[in-house]
Structures are given as C-alpha cells and as structure tokens.
Image (cartoon, rainbow, N blue to C red):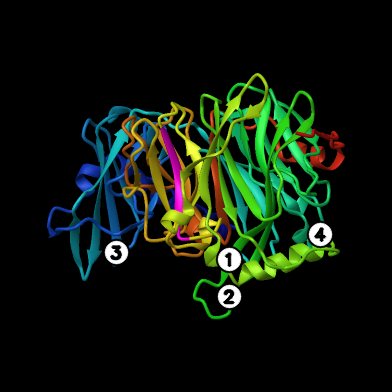
Amino acid sequence: MIKKYFLITSRRFAVLGGFLLAAALCCGCREQLPTDVIEEPAPPVIFPDYSEVTVPVNIAPLNFEIEEEGTEFLTEITGGNGERHLAAGKTVEIPMKFWKKLLAANQEGEIFFTVFAKRDGAWRRFAPIRNSVSSDKIDPWLTYRKIEPGYDRYGNIQMEERCLEDFRTKRFFDNTSLVPEEQLGKSCANCHHCRANDPNNSLFHVRHRWGGTMLRINGKLKKIDTVSRSGFAMSYPSWHPTLPLIAYSSNNTRQIYHSFDLKKIEVLDDFSDLMLYDIERKQIIPVFESDDVYETFPAWRPDGLELYYCVAKLKTSENRVGVSRKDAAEARLEEMGGRTEEIRYSMMKMGFDPQTLRFGEPEVVFDANATSASYVHPRFSPDGRYMIYIKLRYGTFPLTHRESDLWLLDLATGETRPMSEANSDNAESFHSFSSSGRWMVFSSRRGDGQFTRTYFTHFSADGACTKAFLLPTKSPGAERADRFSQNLPEMMTGPLPQTGGEMSRKIRFLTAEKSAVRDG
C-alpha cells in the first residue's frame, strides 16, 4: 500500500511538473527564447501555408505544423500592435483566448509567426512569417459535402457545417445513418445551398431511397418532389433574390474512364435541362427541354432581372427512332466518351420579367466555340458588380481538370481576367461569396492533386483578391490525413436550425409534396 501511495504521488508530481513547465513557457516566454542563434534568411516551411495571407478578424486560430528538421521547436506569435505568445513543439496549436485578442488588437495590421528550430545542437531563427488581419468579418458558418474520392462508385457521403470562428463541427447529413452499408452506392445527396447565405432559407436534394428536395423556408423544413418530365430532379439550384423561385438544372451526371490518358476520369452530363421551381404554387416550370443541348449551372444576377447559365451542344449520330430513352441515353454516352474534348460550355444569359415569369432571348456572354474553352459555375458578388466563373479547356466538371482556374468578369466594364492571386497549378472549383461580398470560398486540389480542400480569399470592392488560405482546423495533421474530399462550400450567417438526427428523421418520414409540371 505504501509503495502504491508513493507511486501515485510521484505521478502527481510529474504531472504538476509538466503544468509548471507549460506555465513557464506561457508566462516567462521572454526568458525562454534562445539568444545565441543562427539566422535563417527565409521563413520556415509550414503546413498549411499560412504565410503572406489575409485573414478575417473573426477567423479561428491558424494552427500549423512546422515542416523543418529539428529536435526542438519554439514559435513566437506576436502582433504589430501588441499581444504575444510562445508555443513549444512542431505542431503549433494557438490558444483561442489569446488568438482572439491578437486579431482584435491588430485589425488592418499584421501578425507574425517567428519559428526557432534546434538542429545539430544549435538554435536557428527563421525569418518571420507575416500575415495581414482584415477588419472585414467573414460569415461565421460554412457548409460543405464530404465524399470519398472514387472512380466507379460513391459510398459514404456526409454534409457538415463548421463554425469559422472556432472549430465546432456538426454533421447534418450522413448516408450511413439512412441505408445499410451494402446500399451506400445508391444513396447520394446534392450539396447544400442557401438563399443569400441565410441558413433558414436553404435546401439540398437527396437521391434514390427517400429521395426528395429538402427545402427549408423561414426555418421550417419540408420535402418536395422536383422530378421533371425528364425523370431527373433538382441539381445546381439558385434562389431568386426577391421571388419565391428557384432556378435549377435536372442533370444525369455520368463518369467515363480513359485507359491511356493520364487524366483517368471525366464527368459528363449526358442529359441536362433548365427548370424553375415556383415554391408557392408547387410548380415546375420548364425553361429548356432538349436531348442534344445541355443547359446547366443557372445563377441569378443579384437584381433578379437576368439569369446566367451554361450550355453545350453536341449532336450525336445514333438513330433513336424506335429506341427506348434509356438505350438512347447509353448510346449517346458512349459516343460522347469518344468526343469529350468537343464538349465545351458557353456562358449565356437571359433577361427575366418578374411579373410574367418569362425569359427573353438568350445572349452569349462567352462563346466556347470561338475561344476553345469551357465556361462554368457563374457566381455573383452580392453588389452585382462582378461575376466569378471557372474556365477550363473542355467539359463540365472542373475538379477533374488541372487547368481549371477562377476568372473574374467586371460587369461594369466587360473586362475579364484570371484571379491569379488565388489560383494554383491544380484544379480550382465550386466558389461562392460571403454575405458581405468581401470573402470568397472555393474548392481546390492544390494540396496533393487528389483530395479537394476548402480555401478562402479576401475579395475587395475593386475586384482584387489575396493569396488563398486553407480552412483552419484544430489539428492540421488530422485534417491532412482525412481521406474525404470537401466540395461545394457555402458560407452562412448562422447555424442550421435542425440537428443531424432531426434531419435524418425528416428525410425518412416526410412525404415529398408533389409538384405539377407547367407547360410553356
């Protein structure tokens, strides 16, 4: 008993000693910094690359890992206008309370990470990492879909919301809670979309079993049937800014595979039409319906008087007389697979009359045939001044194209240019704005070329953007090891009103309200 008592006491003293050491590092940090150092002229390599970036004043701590050789590490975190903290170790996890004070004290100023590494018995001090703090706040919540990368099927699909001011994460959709494991490949969901960043007016579509569009109006959730005459339901929705209307495309997305090309996968729409959904009348209003013309990615201009969309035309050669629609679609897909580089999407727009709900004649914004490029995913800054889009060589799915880049169109001047500050040498895609228009979020494969991650850039009133930074996480190492891709991120002004459990019950037990298809 006595030995046991002393053993426990020794452990307590060891724990106490650890606490005292940590306290010494925090409280006596000025004395802890090495003075006899070798100066390294360049900043250290860290992951994520939080260097020379601009961050919002309300963002969560930029935790990072030091990717330099060494046996011991110290990082001094300071601001030009005050606040100071010392962190020990190769992984730097910044205390939340200190971080909030640091950002608040250095709005429109700079913060610095100065790394010390002990190597071969000598301390080295790297040049400080500099970052800027913007007083422009970011919307505090983010939604995105998590999906396992795959070629021939999809399995576990999740949708999460994350607080950008800290690291709170809540899963509001998980197909493993809806179907047995052997049926996961038959349970999919389109990504979450909000009206003007408002979580209380938002939607996402569930496919296959318990299928339907989960529509949230003023916080109340219902399920609606948005299947059009084509047999396909809602994809890529865009809410009208003032009317109870949702523009969307009904797509049949397919994957094809290249045996000899280094780019092994191509995602095609072998069928896509444009629709309007009238929320109050529960009506589907066809805008375009055709087999050889593929309309997709609708986006309302913020004044609600124009609808932008993308369209590709590919006349296939098979004779479909007397052939079932399913067999005709398979024949069309086979032919499209051999002609993928011919499939280019033009950017179009149409005027819209809010009184009659009628569209004007289509106008070309960017002509794919004239420029030998594809233009997809138009999104507008909330003030209506700029449109951001993705430009790629061909096709409709940017994440399979390394050359996909963000481009900007100034709607006042007609000038268009690549967003070089935010782009990388890998695929960029699926972008959206904060409610203020001062921040953009987008998906990118710049990290390893395989997994899609979430990045942010500051977007100024004159259309300039900054170097993009990765979504901050509590544990950078765990995030890098995550085998899920994140895509279609959207920022929200608050959290979703339903929990994941409530959402699962609604998906299972709500009956989808039938929608009439209106002619003309």
For badge 4, the amino acid type reads Arg
Of the two numbered discs 3 and 1 on the same chain, state the one appearing first in sequence.
3
Dots 2 and 1: beta carbons under 8 Å? yes
Q: Which residue is mark 2?
A: 258
Q: Which residue is mark 4?
A: 325
Q: Is residue 6 magenta?
A: no
Q: Is residue 86 above or below residue 356?
A: below
The N terminus lies in quadrant? bottom right
Q: Depth check: 462 or 104 in front?
A: 462
Q: Which residue is mark 1?
A: 266
Distance of label 2 from label 1 (alpha carbons) = 8 Å
Magenta stretch: dominant secondary structure? strand
Distance of label 3 from label 1 (alpha carbons) = 38 Å
For badge 3, the amino acid type reads Glu
Residue 278 location, x and y as percent?
73, 28
Q: What range is drawn magenta here?
A: 386-393
The C terminus lies in quadrant? top right
Mark 4, mark 2: which one is toward the viewer?
4
Dots 3 and 2: beta carbons under 8 Å? no
Q: Is residue 365 left or right of residue 338?
A: left
Q: Is residue 239 above or below residue 171?
A: above
Q: Which residue is mark 3?
A: 68
Q: Secondary structure at mark 4?
A: helix
For badge 2, the amino acid type reads His
Dots 3 and 1: beta carbons under 8 Å? no
